[in-house]
Amino acid sequence: MTPKRLSSILSGLKRFELTQREKQFLELVKAYFGERGGLTEEQETILEGIHREKMNWERLGLIGRRRAARDPALSEVPHSQGWASSRLAR
C-alpha cells in the first residue's frame, strides 16, 4: 500500500464513528506503517474492508457522517458488524 492510499483511507474513515476496536486497529496500522514503511497483506485486507464497509453503509443511507451517527434513530443500525469488523474480533 502506498502512503498516499493509506492517507486517503485514513482521512476517509475520519468521517465516521468508529468502534473502539476499529480505532485501535487504525492506530496500530499507522504506527506499523511508520516503522516499517508498509503493511502486511492481512492488515491491508482488513483496512480496505473497514473502509469499504463504512462507505457502503453510507451509500445505502444506513449511516451518515459523525453528526448523523449520533442520531438516536440510527443507533440501532449495526454499522460495524460486517466482514471487516468480524476479522478484528479474532
Image (cartoon, rainbow, N blue to C red):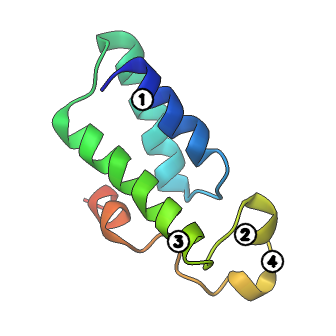
Between marks 3 and 4, how big is the CA–CA gap?
Answer: 15 Å
Q: Position of residue 17 (x, y in %)?
A: 65, 59
Asked if labels 2 and 4 touch by Cβ distance under 8 angstroms, the answer is yes
Asked if labels 2 and 3 touch by Cβ distance under 8 angstroms, the answer is no
User: Is residue 26 visible from the viewing direction of this image?
Assistant: yes
Which residue in the structure is indicated by mark 4? 71
Which residue in the structure is indicated by mark 3? 57
Q: Position of residue 59 (x, y in %)?
A: 56, 70
- Is 29 drawn above or below residue 90 in the view shown? above
Comparing labels 3 and 2, the label whose residue is closer to the camera: 3
Disc 3 is placed on an element classified as helix
Which residue in the structure is indicated by mark 1? 5
Asked if labels 4 and 3 touch by Cβ distance under 8 angstroms, the answer is no
How many numbered marks have been drawn onto this rendered protein structure?
A: 4
Residue at point 67% right, 50% down?
A: 15
Which tag, 3 or 1, sits closer to the chain's start?
A: 1
Report the side of 85 relative to 45 (left or right).
right
Name the residue type under label 1: Arg
Residue at point 27% right, 39% down?
A: 43
Residue 18 found in image quarter: bottom right
Between marks 3 and 2, how big is the CA–CA gap?
Answer: 11 Å
Asked if labels 2 and 1 touch by Cβ distance under 8 angstroms, the answer is no
Which residue in the structure is indicated by mark 2? 69
Name the residue type under label 3: Trp
Disc 4 is placed on an element classified as loop
Q: Residues within 10 Å of mark 2 (few under 14, many from 20)?
A: some
Q: Residues within 10 Å of mark 4 (few under 14, many from 20)?
A: few
Between marks 3 and 1, how big is the CA–CA gap?
Answer: 21 Å
Disc 2 is placed on an element classified as helix
Residue 44 found in image quarter: top left
Name the residue type under label 2: Ala
